[in-house]
Amino acid sequence: MRHQRPEASDGAASAALPSSETIEVLLNRVSVRKFSDRPVDEAHVEAILRAAFRAPTSSNIQSYSVVVVRDREILKQLQPITGGQPHVAVAPVFLAFCVDLTRIEEAMRLNGHDFDDNNFEVGLVSAVDAALVGMSAYLAADSLGIKGVMIGAVRNDAAATARILQLPRRVYCLFGMCLGWPAETPPQKPRMPYEAMVHYERFGNRPDSGAIAASVRTYDRQLAAHYRATGKRTTDDSWSHDMDKKFVARLRDKLRSEVKAQGFDFL
């Protein structure tokens, strides 16, 4: 079904914007957490990952690896780390997207160097690389009709995730992804207003520039209406309330030390 786009800010119907199959996949994207019993075969997984590995990579470093998990015992061990998310234990396939510096470290070793005393940049671009591959995999899967959801909660205990997946030094799991054939597709959440996130030439330099507060208030109302339409209880300041609750305490405060223990001591 074709995505129903909202009105553009200039009053023209945004449905008149250029489109393509890829754009439609993105516009219709939702996170799916309920899967049918139909298995995701290895050919589909390989097709998805081979396509994803063509994602952009900084200076061709290709600093990522993916652990494909189907074993129910391993998934059951990962589930508590993710806050007990039920779909983690029952997903037909779980992909663990990892930042992996082992191949670069070998290249440096061959040239008489090592990663010791490196800096923040290598950790940052490696995480970006892995994230690009993950999103590319998600879209490749979606284009085949396979749906899923990203699982950042593997970082709730990065050390335990590393032990369960037997990750070596210089590798840590950035996020996971549950994939399967959908049994139920939820309605799409609204996003923050386009005009609040797009700037021209310089930050804030746009004809319809408004206060950040106004954009947040607008989105609060839209998200609250969405949640209530789906039967979910929420506050009138839905997004603001949730963001404050999430970040008022330091989030994953042990993550830096856990990642350092995996050999990323330059982050």
Image: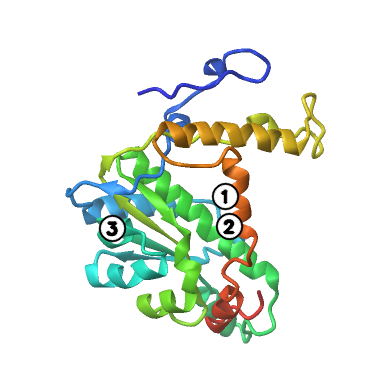
| Residue 42 horizontal/vertical position (percent) | 23, 56
Which residue is labeled 1 in the image? Answer: 242
Mark carried by residue 6: none
Asked which secondary structure carries label 2, the reply is helix
Residue that appears at 28% across and 56% down: 91
Asked which secondary structure carries label 1, the reply is helix
**Image quadrant for the N terminus?**
top left
Three-letter code for the amino acid on which mark 3 is drawn? Val
| Residue 246 horizontal/vertical position (percent) | 58, 57
> In the image, 44: left or right of 189?
left
Which residue is labeled 2 in the image? Answer: 246
Nearer to me, 124 or 161: 161
Please state which of the two labelled residues, at mark 2 or mark 3, is closer to the viewer: 2
- Between marks 2 and 3, how big is the CA–CA gap? 28 Å
The reply to whether discs 1 and 3 touch (Cβ–Cβ < 8 Å) is no
> In the image, 108: left or right of 32?
right
The reply to whether discs 2 and 1 touch (Cβ–Cβ < 8 Å) is yes
Q: Which comes before the other along the chain, label 2 or label 3?
A: 3
Residue that appears at 47% across and 49% down: 135
Nearer to me, 217 or 215: 217
| Residue 118 horizontal/vertical position (percent) | 68, 78
Q: Residues within 10 Å of mark 3 (few under 14, many from 20)?
A: many
Three-letter code for the amino acid on which mark 2 is drawn? Lys
| Residue 31 horizontal/vertical position (percent) | 40, 44
Residue that appears at 58% across and 76% down: 254
